[in-house]
Every structure is written in structure tokens, then in C-alpha cells.
Image (cartoon, rainbow, N blue to C red):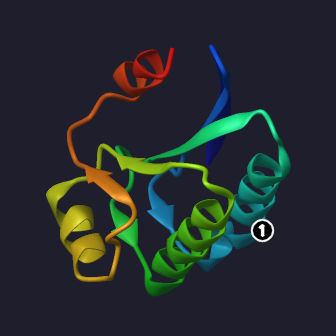
Amino acid sequence: MKIFLDHVRGGKVVRIDVGKQLDFTAYKRFTRATLRALEDPEVVAIVVDLSATHLLFDSGKAMLIDLKMRANSLGIPLRLLNSSPEIWHKLAMVEYSKIHLNRYANVGVYSRSLR
């Protein structure tokens, strides 16, 4: 898992590159990164890049749901980007009505659109 901070006009965008799988082994690192992002008043969006993710376990879905609820309560947009069709299908099976799912979006394009 890699965490990036993009400075854009109006604030910061936190990008989290999940890696090959999102499961309970990533819980501490994912939670630590997302809590820091949510506590930073300059963060204007959180992007979770799923381009390298091949395995999404129920614990990973739970982490994304928790992040969605926390981000929504603070008014911070959350975007899940670049998911494979298999990952997208798993996410679509869960109630993600307030998370923007975009299988093909480029993170750089998203970052530029915030400027």
C-alpha cells in the first residue's frame, strides 16, 4: 500500500494505492492513513486507487464502507478508481450509492480536475 498527497488549489487530495489485495492484513496501515486524512482540515478529497487490486475480501469491503461513512460525515468526497471488472462487480454488490465508482478513470485526471 502506498499513500500519496497531491496539493491542489483549495487543499490536498490523499491518494491511497491499495496494492494487490485489500484485506485484514492491511487494516492498521489503511486505517492509520485514512484517519490522518480525515483529521487534516486541508484535505478536500480522498482517492482509493484499485488498479493493482486483484483480491478484495469482506474485511476490505468493510474498511471501504467505514471510510465512506466517515468521509461522508465530514463532507469529504471519496472516489474509488481504476478497479478491474471483478473488483467493480464485488463493490457493486454492496451498497455503495454514495461512493463514486469509476473503473477507468485516471487518478491524474481526477487530481487535475480539482485544481
Q: Which structural element holds mark 1?
A: helix
Residue 16 in view in this figure? no
Residue 103 in view in this figure? yes
Asked where in the image residue 12 lies, by quadrant, the reply is top right
**In the image shown, does 48 or 87 lie closer to the viewer?**
48
Residue at 75 percent across and 47 percent down: it is 37
Say above or below: 81 vs 69. Answer: above
Residue at 46 percent across and 63 percent down: it is 21
Residue 95 appears at what percent x and percent y?
33, 81
Q: Mark 1 points at which residue?
A: 28
Say above or below: 24 vs 12. Answer: below
Mark 1 neighbour class, 10 Å CA radius: few under 14, some 14 to 19, many 20 or more? few
Residue at 27 percent across and 65 percent down: it is 87
**In the image shown, does 114 or 36 lie closer to the viewer?**
114
Residue 104 appears at what percent x and percent y?
20, 39
Residue at 51 percent across and 14 percent down: it is 115
